[in-house]
Structures are given as structure tokens and as C-alpha cells.
Amino acid sequence: MALRLVSDFDLRKDVLPWLRSQRAASAAPGARGGGPGVLENNYESLRILNVERNENIIYTYKDDKGNVFFGLYDCRTRQNEHLYTFEKDLHVVSCSVNSERTLLAASLVHFTKEGRKNELQPGSKCLTLLVEIHPVNNVKVLKAVDSYIWVQFLYPHVESRPLAENHLLLISEEKYIEKFHIQVIQEDGNRVVLKDSGHLPRERVAEDFVWAQWDMSEQRLYYVDLKMSRSVLKCIQFSADGKFNLMFEAPLDITLSDSGFKLVNFGCDDLQDQKNLSKHLTLCVFTNHTGTLCVCYSPKFDSWGKITYTVFYFHKDYYVAVYLPGHLFHLLNIQHPDLICHSLFLTGNNEVVDMLPHSPLQSLSGSLVLDLCSGKLYRAVLNQSYLLQFLWNTQLDCEKMAVLHCVLSCGRDPQFLEAKLIQWISENVSACHSFDLIQEFIIASSYWSIYPETSNMDKLLPYSSVFAWDTEIPGITLVTEEIPLPFMKVHSFKGYWEKLNSNLEYVKYSKPRLLYDNSMVQKEWHSLISEEKTGRRRSMVYMRNIRENAMKVISNLEARNLEPRLTPLFQEEDNHQRLLMGLMVSELKDHLLRHLQGIEKKKIEQMVLDYISKLLDLICQILETSWRKHHLHPQLLHCSRRASAAEFTVFHLMTRILEATRTLFLPLPPGFHTLHTMLGVHCLPLYNLLHYFDNGVLLLTETAVTRLMKDLDNSEKNEKLKFSIIVRLPPLIGQKICRLWDHPMSSNIISRNHVRVLLLNYKKQPRSSMIDKSPGSVEFLPLNYFIEILADIESSNRALLAFEGHDNVDAKFVEEAALKHTTMLLGS
């Protein structure tokens, strides 16, 4: 299943055996708790009451006389402890223990004669008690009222020493919350008692609310009150000394009734009938240490056929899981809520839904989940192995994209997961029709590789290759809209609140779209290439800076990958790709420096190098994986034999990589085009090959052409290929390549280029009518005259010809080439 629930606690396994052993060890009649058979007959009464901040679990059970027992399970030591026994038949509403385990607070109600807990009719009482339990001593009644009361001790963040003062929250069904100040002292050694049990100071924390939630981990109280029929979410932060502050107010566009009352995570409520879930609204607040705040709300719904819920993102981060037992499991990417395809929606009879518990789950702080029905406390984690398996099996593009991002963003072993994803991509490169799979992987993986470096990176770097998703997702309707930001009520922030406030300020004042793109790099790159062809040059300082940027990227990449690569990449200069790398470094660095305030320039420079290195490394990894899978080796790429199916598969993959990077104008590893061209020559018939050349799919790099000229013989087929290649080369490269081909055709081309250079600035001079014939010269006056002119020009332009690379070509060479060409034309 996509969400794996790892059991941290199980009543049956962690408590029941201990209780049995305690009963068996009690030999005396009437000993506390009765005999071992008593518990077996009342197992259904064993239930969890509360999970405290230190994750200690408080539970209760009854004997056959109705006596109520309280116990505690320490999740750190894995030990149980008996806390207290009420020798009355009462029903426990709520219970909490202070951090030192010296005080226990509990609220209880009487049972009616019919054996059911009373409905708190007039005359009945809910008792809220404070008990000294170190050792068991006095009991103080805090409340005796006709409404339910819930209790919760505050837990300090520092537990290094016993506290002289404890703080207890009382939450009333009458819609108010009080905080009691409880001072304790030590008597007779370690005996802890109330200092002044007759007078416990109290203060009102909140009132007139319709919903409240307790965050045990962060000691926060969230509650909603109604102002002019508008729901307003508020948050109170408690500090270690018991003081508290109202941190923010946030209006919510939800409908809550003034007559309603709902508590979340104030202990563990009695299990509601699953059939009645649709009759109750659900509202939960989620936060994490990065400064995230979101609210999930589900109103009452009339049928299971249409279920509506709302998620408010005040700041976005990672995922929220939405689960309705037996009906749906949604994994919402709240980092990028605008793209519905980044969230996973599983409904109906999907095996993921079937494999999760079919009972209601209570979400506690962090990733803790409580199943009251089974008495188990789980820690929810994403099941990476299942997600990878799901990726191979699903047919929907939206699910492929959602799982791809989920694995990349939440993976605990990025290198392992990237290898698995690359394996899947290599074998399913054409499986997605709504988006380019290679593009999405490269962009997403590069983004998540540096995301932890700083917050708000989703505003500055592209996280997806798509900007909108228009394809329907079966069974899902999504509506997004802007919401008001919370109004912070304090001016000094620390920890979580500092991060949240910073995130909110960034959202408030930042421009809507600051995502980096390579459009400026593309424009500048084309400009530099054009200048190179025309012989113009930029300043040496500018070009040196670009080349140094590229060298830093390659060095950074090589430092991160110490294992040798099988694919023959990074074995040539490939100036054009290095130019693209260098330009991208400059442009991306400027972009981040403009918008990442307060971060050192050196750190930003390293982030840029890491990001671009990651882009290149991912391409290398995709190629390396396919290369190794098909057992290819550089020495196998001989054009004299027929290409194998494996080689054609790799060629197709490289073509798809080229398409993906070209659209985004991303750099490729030096040597990529050479390898791609060599495979193309090896795999494609001449007509298709020339079509790939003419349409820019294959590039005739100097390295690739040089190798072809050396490796191919002069068969008729290869002569056609060589000539077709030479005529497509730029003049300067073509002239160099022709020297490698010992063939009349190449001699003819060399001669033509030589003559063109000589005659470029030739001015006709008066000449003698007599022609000196050298021994062995041909009796062909026009040619003799022309060769003599060339020889004269050569004698006066030796320096120019040497600079142009004509040192091995002279008038004699031209004469021989002309005669050979004429002989070929005459067929003699």
C-alpha cells in the first residue's frame, strides 16, 4: 500500500501480557485488579485514553466489579506502569498525566441502571478529579458539573528537572477552556503533594468556540469561533512556564454551527459508528517544522457517491494524506497544489484503499495515527517499494506523474530511488502521452536535489515540465482559489513561528511567477554561435568567465561521481555544450542572487553548480543504465556491421533525451552528440540518416566525422555517405576532414577550397605570353596557364596560406586533382 502504517504500540501485545502477569503474580485474595480471569472477561473495556507529548500512552480497563484502572505505557522504555484505581463503576471521559507522573487528572461520569453512561440529565454529574499518585494519596475535585469535561496537562519542552508548578487545561462542553496552576512540593523524601489544594489559581484561555484541536507535540491550541457568522481559526501557543499567546487569526470559508461542539486530539474519544461518519464534519490542522500550516475540512455529506472536502494551504509543504475507510485514499501534494496531476487519487475498490484499516483513524501530531478500534498506535510512512511497483503497473498518466514526484520528494534514499526510476523510464520512455517523461524526471529530480538548501525554492526553480493539467482525472473535480493569509498577532517570533511568518511574508510580497527559464540563455547562446561563424569575438574576459563556469560544472560533476562510466562521454571538448553550461551558470546565479535575500553568495554559487551538475548527471545515468542493461561497449560501434536491436534501443532513447533537453534548452554532457551520431550512422539507412542530419536531430561533430572517415572503407556505399557528410559540414571543419579521406573526391574539394582562398583577393597582373612547362607537365594550355597563376600567388602569400592550414596544398596538388577529376568524368 502507498501509505505504510508501522505499529508503535498495540494494546494486545504491549499491555495485555503485562496485565496477565500482574494478575498471576497477585496471590493474595482481593489484591488490586483481581485474578487473571477477571481481565479476560472484561477485555473489551481495555482502551486507550490519551497519548501525551512524550508519546506515553494512558489506557484504562475495568474488572468485573466495575472498578476503573489507569495504566501507562512508556514508548521509550517499552514498560508498563499502574497509575491509579477508582473503586467505583464510572465511565472515563478523559485522562492526562503530568510529565513527572506525580499527578493524574481525570473526568468521569456515572453509569445508569441500564448499564449505559448517562446523558448528563439534570441531577447527574461529571466529576473532574486531580489525584496525587506519587505515591497515591489525596484526591481533589476540580469540577462537578452537568456537562462533559476534558483534561490535558501541559508538557514543557525541557524535562531536565522536576517542575514546581504544573499547568492543566480543562475543556468544557459549555465552550470554554480554563488553565489551572498547580504547585507541588516534596515531603518525606520523594513524596509529591499539592502545595495548596484548597486554592488552585485558574485563568480563562478561550471561550465561545465551536471547535478546538490540541497539538500535543508543539503544545498548541487551535480553535474556531464565530464572528458575525464567519468562522475564524485562532491559535494559542503555550510556553514551558505555562504562559500563552494568541499567535494568529485566520478567516476560513467554512460553515460551522454555533450550536455545534467538536474536539480533536483532546484524548481519545469513544469510537463513533462508522456508518455515522457522514453525519459529522471533520476539521483538522496540520503543521510541520518547516513553517507549514494547512487546514483540512470535510462537511457533512448525504451520500457516499459524492464526497467533498477542502484543504486550506496557508503555506505549502510536502503531502497530506486524506483517507475515508473503504472509500478513498488521496495523497495531496500541497507543495504544488496548482497541478492536480502531482496528487494521487485512489478511490473505490483500489487495493491501496482495501489494505488500510477499515476503521476510523485519529491523526495525532506529526505522523502518528491512532486506530481506536484495534488499540494500535501507528507511525505513517510512505511505502516507497509499493509506490515504485505502482508506477510500473498504472496506466494513467496523472498517476505516473503523481507517484514520480512523491518518490522524488519524500524518498529516504535518493540515489537508490533515482536508479529505480531511471530503470522504469528506460523501459517506458514512450509510455506517457500527456507529458514528456524524461523532461519531467530531469526537472523534478534536479529541483528536489537542492530544495532542502533553502525555503521557497518552488517560487524560483521549475519543479515540473508542465504548467497546467487539462486532462480529466477520473472521479475527481478540483477547484482552487486564493484565500486570505493569517493575521499574525505577535511581533517577536522564534522557531516554527519565525519560519511560518517568513513564509507568509514571502507569499505576501513576492511576485506571482519568478520561475527560472533558459530563454535568455538560449538567446545569448545563439548570438555567440552566430558570431563564431562570422569570425566576430566577444571580449576575452567574458568568454573566459563562461569557459571557467563550464569547467566548474564538470569538475563538480566528476567529484560527485567517482565510479568510471561505461558510456564514452566527457571525452571531448564539445565547445558548444560547454558554452551552454557556462551561460546557464551565469544566468541562474544572477536569478537566485536577485530573489534569495540573506543567503551568502558563495552558497548560491554552489547551489547553481549542484543544480546544473545534477541535470547533466541524470542524463548520464539514464544513458549508463541503458548502456549496461544492453551490454554495449564503445568498441562495438563499428559501422561495418549491422546494428543490433539493443543498439537501436539506445539510439532511440538518446533521441528522446535530445528532444526533451532541446525543448527546455538544457545542456547535454560533452560527447553526447558524437555518441548519438555514431549510433545513428550505425542504425539508420542512408536516406533516414541524411534526413536526421538535415533536421538537426543528429549533429555532425568534428569528433564523430573524424572517426567515420577513419573507420569506413571506400566502398560505394561508404563513399556516398562520406561525401554526403562532407558537403553538410561548415567550410572550416569540412576542409580539415577532407584531409583525412584519401580519395579523389576529397582532393577535389580541398583543391577547390585552396583555389577559392588564393583567388579571393586576386588582381590580374600583366603576364608574359610564354609559359614555362615543367618536366612531365600535361600539354593542356588553359590548365598550365592557371597553375602558373596559382604558383605565383602562392609564392607571395606563404604566411597567409600557412595560417589558413594550406601548408600541404599547392598548385601541383591542384593540377593533379584537376587531372584526376577530368579523367573520372571522361571515364578513362
Image (cartoon, rainbow, N blue to C red):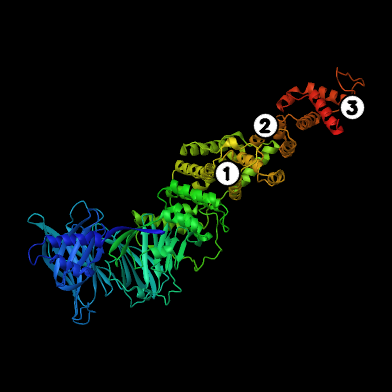
The 10 Å Cα crowd at callout 1, few under 14, some 14 to 19, many 20 or more, is many
Going by the numbered disc 2, the residue's amino acid type is Lys
Give the number of marks: 3
The 10 Å Cα crowd at callout 3, few under 14, some 14 to 19, many 20 or more, is few
Q: State the CA–CA distance, disc 1 to disc 3.
A: 53 Å
From the viewer's side, name the closer residue of 310 and 558. Answer: 558
Contact, mark 1 vs mark 3 (Cβ under 8 Å): no
Per the rendering, the mark at residue 465 is: none
User: Along the polypeptide, which appears first: circle 1 or circle 3?
Assistant: 1
In the picture, the quarter occupied by the N terminus is bottom left
User: Along the polypeptide, which appears first: circle 1 or circle 2?
Assistant: 1
From the viewer's perspective, tell me whether residue 466 is left or right of residue 246.
Answer: right
User: Circle 2 is placed at which residue position?
Assistant: 710
User: Along the polypeptide, which appears first: circle 3 or circle 2?
Assistant: 2
From the viewer's side, name the closer residue of 353 and 608. Answer: 353
Q: Secondary structure at mark 3?
A: helix
310, above or below 413, in the image = below
Residue 768 placement (x, y as % from top left): 91, 21
Per the rendering, the mark at residue 782 is: 3
Per the rendering, the mark at residue 667 is: 1
